[in-house]
């Protein structure tokens, strides 16, 4: 049964902190919880909410003006419905990037509430992944044009992989049957064999050893993505 008010989080969180040697008081200058210790230069501030939401984030960011030790505390339920209960990893990453701590409180019928600290409030230092940047730039540079509308959702995107598969489909329709080696020469792509064997879109079929042809799905794709083919084909088509 979900809690009815965020005040129900107060005692479990207070007990959790007191067990670790902090002195705890509620509602100090609009802060839900303030905890201090002789070992701390700054107080710990905790904002409570029934569920994780944008209002809680704004509160947490505002409290960073008072202390670097700011936590957001919300209820964690067994119920899977609700974005906050399905995406704790994403929520933790968001809090980490904002320099906020995150803790959850889970209530039980026959035992005390459980507190779990998912993220500590350390200042976030952005670090880019060279591998991800390389993949991003590869996808950008290898696309022959801009075929997708930014912000699209649940639509089939024209990726580099789809473009190369379309290029294979184009030559297979033109020549009826081809080997991976022949397609590699025609398309200039070194990943032809992988594209044919994985057959992610179901466009290709092996008719005999080392020989591939186009399926009805592949023929349909050439019509659907005719605009991509038209933009890509002005490349010299080598003979076999």
Image: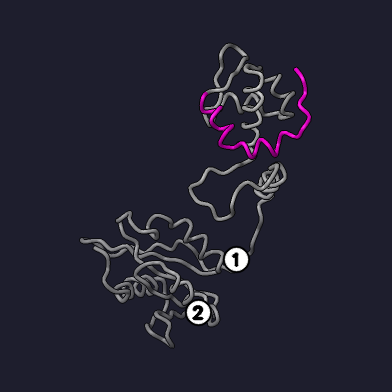
Residue 185, image x and y in percent?
A: 74, 23
Residue that appears at 38% across and 64% down: 104
Q: Which sits earlier in the primary sequence, circle 1 or circle 2?
A: 2
> Where is mark 2, residue-wise?
63
Residue 182, image x and y in percent?
A: 71, 19
Specify the principal SS of the magenta part: helix
Q: Between 117 and 37, which is closer to the camera in this rendering?
A: 117
The image quarter in which residue 207 lies: top right
Quick one: label 1, few (<14), some, or many (20+) residues within 10 Å?
Answer: few
Q: Specify whether residue 25 is painted magenta.
A: no
Residue 6, image x and y in percent?
A: 32, 74
Q: Between 110 and 176, which is closer to the camera in this rendering?
A: 176
For residue 181, above or below residue 115: above
Where disc 1 sits, the SS reads loop
For residue 172, above or below residue 48: above
| Spatial separation of the CA atoms under disc 1 and disc 2 | 16 Å
> Where is mark 1, residue-wise?
124
Q: Specify whether residue 234 is painted magenta.
A: yes
Residue segment shown in magenta? 216-240
In the displayed orientation, state which residue is furthest to the top: 208
In the displayed orientation, state which residue is furthest to the left: 110
The image quarter in which residue 127 lies: bottom right
For residue 212, above or below residue 138: above
């Amino acid at each position: 049964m979900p809690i009815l008010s965020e005040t129900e989080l107060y005692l479990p969180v207070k007990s959790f902190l007191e067990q670790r040697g902090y002195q705890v008081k509620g509602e100090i200058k609009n802060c839900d919880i303030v905890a201090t210790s002789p070992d701390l230069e700054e107080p710990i501030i905790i904002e409570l909410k029934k569920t994780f939401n944008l209002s809680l984030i704004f509160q947490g960011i505002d409290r960073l003006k008072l202390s670097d030790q700011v936590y957001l505390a919300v209820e964690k339920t067994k119920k899977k419905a609700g974005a906050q209960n399905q995406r704790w990893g994403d929520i933790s990453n968001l809090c980490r990037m904002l320099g906020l701590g995150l803790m959850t409180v889970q209530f039980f019928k026959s035992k005390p509430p459980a507190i779990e600290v998912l993220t500590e409030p350390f200042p976030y230092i952005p670090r880019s992944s060279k591998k991800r940047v390389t993949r991003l730039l590869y996808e950008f540079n290898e696309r022959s044009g801009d075929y997708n509308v930014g912000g699209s959702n649940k639509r089939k995107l024209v990726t580099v992989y789809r473009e190369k598969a379309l290029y294979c489909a184009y030559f297979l329709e033109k020549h009826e049957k081809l080997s991976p080696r022949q397609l590699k020469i025609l398309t200039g792509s070194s990943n032809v064999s992988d594209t044919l064997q994985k057959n992610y879109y179901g466009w290709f079929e092996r008719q005999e050893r080392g020989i591939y042809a186009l399926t009805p799905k592949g023929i349909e794709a050439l019509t659907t993505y005719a605009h991509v083919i038209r933009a890509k084909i002005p490349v010299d088509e080598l003979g076999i």
